[in-house]
């Protein structure tokens, strides 16, 4: 059986955030900062359809997000982040897709590049592949810098159309 290599996508690319014109914003670092679009959904319809196609192609989806500040099990911010993650997962499922995981990366002052590399290597091992086989689709330069030396390929998407096109090509 061929290993199912996951596609890593920055959370802010698929969901509405603090962007202009109510569109997706890759600068949204945490699910707790996400908001709904004009139609009440957190994810644009075109993106939901592309994520459903990924699922039909048996390509696991792993979202990359910035770890919330002061990450601790009892903190209110973590609760909001996990609530936002649950909302995103439900919406992706309603659209016909499946969210396999959300990987929270630490960007704090004392975070280490080596730690992020190890986290992504562990993720690759769980899916039966190596780090060089991972593809990350990102929108922010911060996330691109964080994963560049830890995955095989980094693709930058600057808009919803770019993201949908990229998902179709790599899915």
Image (tube, helix red, strand yellow):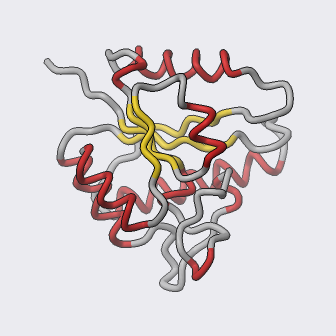
Q: Position of residue 112 (x, y in %)?
A: 74, 20
- Quadrant in which the C terminus is drawn: top left
- In percent of the image, x 58 and y 82: which residue is there? 21
What residue is rendered at 61% in x and 44% in y? 65
In the rendered structure, the answer to whether residue 121 lies left or right of residue 76 reads: left
107 shown above or below 13? above
103 shown above or below 138: above
In the picture as drawn, the residue positioned furthest to the bottom comes out as 38
Picture quadrant where residue 143 is located: top right
Q: Position of residue 150 (x, y in %)?
A: 52, 23
Instruction: Give the quarter of the figure containing the N terminus.
Output: top left
Tally of numbered tags: 0
Q: Is residue 69 left or right of residue 2?
A: right
Depth order, front residue of 69/171:
171
Residue 155, percent from left and from top? 42, 44
Image spot of residue 63 (x, y percent)? 49, 43
**Vertical order, 26 against 42 (above or below):** above
Residue drawn 60% across and 51% down? Answer: 140
Residue 158 versus residue 12: which sits nearer the camera?
158
- The residue positioned 56% from the left and 68% from the top of the image is 16
């Amino acid at each position: 059986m061929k290993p199912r290599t996951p596609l890593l996508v920055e959370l802010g690319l698929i969901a509405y955030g603090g962007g202009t014109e109510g569109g997706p914003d890759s600068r949204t670092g945490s699910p707790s900062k996400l908001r709904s679009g004009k139609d009440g959904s957190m994810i644009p319809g075109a993106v939901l359809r592309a994520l459903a196609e990924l699922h039909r192609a048996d390509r696991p989806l792993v979202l990359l997000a910035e770890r919330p500040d002061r990450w601790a099990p009892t903190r209110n911010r973590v609760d909001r982040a996990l609530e936002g993650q649950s909302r995103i997962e439900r919406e992706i499922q309603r659209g016909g897709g499946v969210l396999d995981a959300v990987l929270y990366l630490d960007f704090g002052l004392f975070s280490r590049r080596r730690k992020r590399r190890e986290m992504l290597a562990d993720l690759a091992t769980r899916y039966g592949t190596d780090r060089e086989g991972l593809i990350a689709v990102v929108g922010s330069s911060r996330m691109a810098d964080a994963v560049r030396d830890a995955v095989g390929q980094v693709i930058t998407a600057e808009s919803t159309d770019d993201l949908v096109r990229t998902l179709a090509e790599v899915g």
